[in-house]
Image (tube, grey):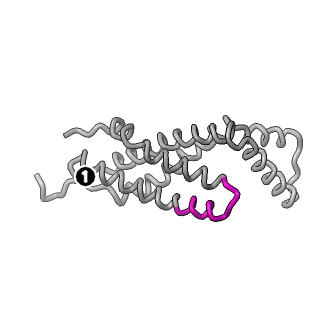
């Protein structure tokens, strides 16, 4: 059986997208207990990514998968899932909690002020542009891709399983 990597990734990214969305909503809350739950959910997401790829290896690749296939599968699932999460993030920051990004901007500006880092108008306008819902979501997709590559490289090494030298 020749596995179709993209087709399988499209079938399975929804669950990861839901988990990433719940993690964002929990981390956006002002209570520490929700932030703790978001951290626990982050660990669960890594475990879930591992289990999904092992399932893909065993069910669709006849128990054999190369490092590159495992990396590609995890990367695709994570990127597609993060796109779902970013749609939720856009809805949340645009319609549900419209002050979320402005409060993040305030925290960032206070941190700059506390560290006595000078800020001119150009830098301030850049921060304002970054903390706009569309820009913020786009940047999160980019950084999610970096995170996806990081976890995929690590986990693919554990998941790869090639044909034994004794098999013909």
Magenta highlight on residue 34:
yes
Q: Position of residue 162 (x, y in %)?
A: 24, 54
Q: Secondary structure at mark 1?
A: helix
Write down the quadrant of residue 157 in the picture.
bottom left
What range of the chain is rendered magenta? 29-40
Residue at 61% across / 50% down in the picture? 25
Q: Which residue is mark 1?
A: 58
Q: Residue furthest front?
A: 96
How many numbered badges does the structure rendering display?
1
Left or right? Give the position of 75 relative to 147.
Answer: left
Residue at 22% across / 52% down in the picture? 63
Residue at 70% across / 57% down in the picture? 30
Q: Position of residue 127 (x, y in %)?
A: 78, 42
Q: Position of residue 103 (x, y in %)?
A: 78, 49
Q: In the rendered image, which quarter contains the N terminus? A: top left
Q: Position of residue 77 (x, y in %)?
A: 43, 44
- Using the image as rendered, state which of residue 90 and residue 5 is in the foreground: 90
Magenta highlight on residue 109:
no
Q: Magenta region's main secondary structure? A: helix
Left or right? Give the position of 70 relative to 123.
Answer: left
- Using the image as rendered, state which of residue 17 and residue 60 is in the foreground: 17
- Using the image as rendered, state which of residue 1 and residue 82 is in the foreground: 82
Residue 58 position (above or below residue 92): below
Mark 1 crowd level (few <14, some 14–19, many ≥20, 10 Å Cα)? some
Residue 60 position (above or below residue 37): above
Write down the quadrant of residue 161 in the picture.
bottom left
Residue at 41% across / 48% down in the picture? 74
């Amino acid at each position: 059986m020749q596995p179709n990597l993209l087709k399988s990734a499209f079938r399975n990214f929804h669950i990861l997208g839901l988990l990433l969305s719940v993690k964002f909503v929990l981390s956006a809350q002002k209570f520490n207990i929700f932030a703790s739950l978001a951290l626990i959910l982050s660990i669960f997401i890594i475990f879930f990514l591992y289990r999904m790829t092992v399932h893909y290896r065993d069910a669709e690749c006849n128990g054999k998968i190369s490092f590159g296939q495992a990396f590609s599968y995890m990367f695709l699932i994570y990127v597609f899932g993060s796109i779902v999460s970013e749609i939720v993030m856009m809805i949340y920051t645009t319609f549900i909690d419209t002050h979320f990004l402005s409060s993040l901007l305030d925290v960032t500006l206070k941190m700059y002020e506390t560290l006595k880092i000078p800020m001119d108008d150009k830098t301030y306008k850049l921060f304002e542009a970054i903390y706009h819902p569309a820009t913020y979501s786009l940047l999160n997709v980019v950084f999610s891709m970096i995170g996806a590559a990081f976890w995929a490289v690590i986990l693919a090494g554990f998941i790869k399983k090639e044909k034994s030298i004794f098999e013909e």
